[in-house]
Amino acid sequence: MKNKKFMTSCLGVSFGALLVGSVWTAQSDAHDVDQHADRILREMGDYLRTADEYTFRADITYDDVVDDQMIQFGAVAHLSLQRGAERLPDRLNVEYKGDEMRRRVVFDGKTITLHNQSRNVYAITEVPPKVDLALDQFFEVFGSSVPIADLVYSDPYRTLIENAETGYVVGQHPVNDVLCHHLAFAQETIDWQIWIEVGPRPVPRKLVITYRDEPGSPQYVSELSEWNFTPRLSEHYFTFRPPEDADEIEFLPPQEREGEQQ
């Protein structure tokens, strides 16, 4: 799990982070994670890692400070991933509709396009053909990351666990009437919890992140549903075609975006 940093703009206009931003901080492997919690998280990661393709829905709420007051915003995201064979590229499509923005992200195996649908502007950057390297490069250009992106990396377990310092099983609790293993982890500046479905399909059903280093300890919450491992998505789905009258713009380096307001 990556440590988060709020971002308020990108692409040289009022763009904001994709969902809620985070900054990569590679650290050592887990220090004091309960073996039961580690096993459940690993089983979830293996289940996603071995899937050729899948789609899911994320119902998101997140806190941000507006005029010195903590405000909660909401969004709905639909994510679709296809993993290519050994020499074929991966592909990813994200549709995001939220209180603060509407956007689409398309990774076609060669480039990532970020389209701000609210302003009808888009930016394109070339990336490697595999989703891990593509997202790492994109987030470096973008200046922030996205919590639920951890679930589309080639090894979700490793991506989630690598910065964890402690972790344990809270119990078994339902999420939208689906019984789940409820796990809690802590690392240097954040606490995070994940609910993983009990049974033969160990998909994540909920993710909560608390950012202890931010004033007021804001939270990011994502409920995950509508998992589909046989979506049969066509190549057209991962192709970006600019809408009429859309303007192409360039990504600005993160340091050039500091001080801009959403």
Image (spheres, rainbow, N blue to C red):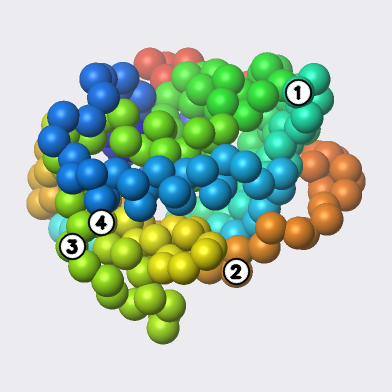
Disc 4 to disc 2, how far (Cα)? 21 Å
Disc 1 to disc 4, how far (Cα)? 33 Å
The mark found on residue 226 in the picture is 2
Mark 4 and 2 residues: CB-CB less than 8 Å, in contact? Answer: no
Name the amino acid, label 2: Glu
| For residue 126, side relative to residue 172 (left or right) | right
Mark 3 and 1 residues: CB-CB less than 8 Å, in contact? Answer: no
Q: Residue visible at 76% across and 32% down?
A: 84
The mark found on residue 86 in the picture is 1
The mark found on residue 170 in the picture is 3
Mark 3 and 4 residues: CB-CB less than 8 Å, in contact? Answer: yes
| Residue 144 x/y as whole percent | 41, 30
Disc 3 to disc 1, how far (Cα)? 38 Å
Q: Is residue 106 visible?
A: no
- Viewer-nearest residue: 12 or 24: 24
Disc nearer the start of the sequence (2/3): 3
Disc nearer the start of the sequence (4/2): 4
Report helix, strand or loop for mark 1. Answer: loop
- Please give the residue where the numbered disc 4 appears in the rendered image: 183
Few, some or many C-alpha atoms within 10 Å of disc 4 (few <14, some 14-19, many ≥20)?
many
Q: Residue visible at 38% across and 76% down?
A: 179
Few, some or many C-alpha atoms within 10 Å of disc 2 (few <14, some 14-19, many ≥20)?
few
Disc nearer the start of the sequence (1/4): 1
